[in-house]
Amino acid sequence: MRASILLAGLAALSSSAASRPGKKRLIIDTDMLNFDDDPLAIGLANIFQAWGQVEFIGVMSSINSRFAPPAIDAINTFYGHPDIPIALRKPVNNLTQWPQYPQYGDYLTGLTYNFTQDIQDGVYTPDPVSSYRYLLSTSADSSVTIAAIGFFGNLYGVLQSGGDAISPRTGAELLAAKVGELVVQADERGRSFNTGWREGAEAAAVLNWWPGRATFAGDAVAGATVLGRRLTAEPDPARHPLAYALRRSIGPAAAHPVWDAVAVYYAVCGAGDVFAPRYPRGGRVALNASAYATWAEPAPAAPPGPHNALDFRLPNDTFAARLEDTLLWEPGSRVPRERTWCKN
Ligand SMILES: *[C@@H]1O[C@H](CO)[C@@H](O)[C@H](O)[C@H]1NC(C)=O
Ligand SMILES: *[C@@H]1O[C@H](CO)[C@@H](O)[C@H](O)[C@H]1NC(C)=O
Ligand SMILES: *[C@@H]1O[C@H](CO)[C@@H](O)[C@H](O)[C@H]1NC(C)=O
Ligand SMILES: *[C@@H]1O[C@H](CO)[C@@H](O)[C@H](O)[C@H]1NC(C)=O
């Protein structure tokens, strides 16, 4: 996606969505670098878009690597969605792996150089806060679902933003009005990677404020869904970006938890036959200054709380097999319309 056509692309996306009221509009906020699960999450959103389940309207990167946007664009392009807007914070850097996690191989440069994409370099992408503000302000009330599968600096920036040329409304007003559900890949209790490893103060500011529905896809579901043996072995990794990324990250014929893909499955399909809310009356998350989360249930006479967390209703291996089957779907293959699950 060229930066020059960004606004045209955004306008086309928002008008096509306007003609289809009721379909969720999905924004993914990702820390895709060298972990296995972010490419699968982005691939899954593309597959659900191809199946007509969701309007996948944007990707925000919560890291600064110049290779992240072209790699994300390579995945979107493989699935036939080369113009989904992708935003990255600046200044860009050249990171291809977390230095703390060298056991997971680099796939960003391979996706950038050996797959079809037209961003080339993250330096050409727009700013995530402006992109959020644009996408939110052009969406119907409560129509947007945000899958927060990375860090919280972008959402914090939106929350801090005031009215501007994009919208007279503050970021807080836009988030409260436009977002129907925030899906967080983290636990609602204790410390989690996405809410605490980096930008914990930003995660605390966003989540302690979040007035609407927020659902935590944590270790009980997202950490207990393990797959990859088929995806690393069956598709040709020179052609299939998810097979390529997964093999580079975890190796061939391997399986691994796929946290973020589980969060995106829920973000699109809802609880369905897979998940059950953990708290019948909901509650609220509160993060302290060390990004340690505690959970508060509503008082007996109080209304239900807006936050919740997920447990499995299905056995995890049944869900993992379904998710891996779905991730093996390729453009041009038959869409499995007879399925009973995820029909939006
Ligand atoms: C990234 O790599 C390019 C090309 O090798 C180099 O010119 C640039 O200085 C590097 N940027 C950073 C932030 O290290
Ligand atoms: C791109 O593909 C070529 C040819 O297969 C290979 O030699 C090269 O290592 C690949 N580059 C990356 C960054 O994976
Ligand atoms: C946050 O809570 C954890 C768990 O109770 C505690 O260990 C930590 O010291 C707290 N941090 C702050 C800054 O209060
Ligand atoms: C199911 O969960 C168990 C316990 O967390 C885990 O050891 C196993 O790998 C999981 N299986 C699948 C297929 O996700």
Image (cartoon, grey):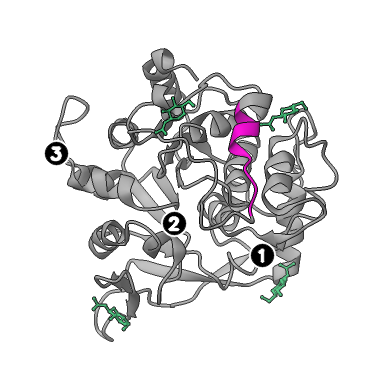
Q: Point out the tag, 2 or 3, that comes first from the N-terminus.
A: 3
The residue lying furthest to the bottom in this view is 300
- Figure quadrant of residue 138: top left
- Figure quadrant of residue 224: bottom right
Residue 96 image point, x, y percent: 54, 41
Depth check: give the residue in front, 322 or 118. Answer: 118
Residue at position x 59%, y 31% from top? 76
Query: Callout 2: helix, strand or loop?
Result: strand
Q: Dot 2 corresponds to which residue?
A: 183
Query: Callout 2: few (<14), some (14-19), or many (20+) C-alpha neighbours within 10 Å?
Result: many
Q: Dot 3 corresponds to which residue?
A: 162
| Residue 63 in magenta stretch | no
Q: Is residue 82 above or below residue 292?
A: above
| Disc number placed over residue 16 in the picture, else none | none
Q: Dot 1 corresponds to which residue?
A: 225
Amino acid of disc 2: Val
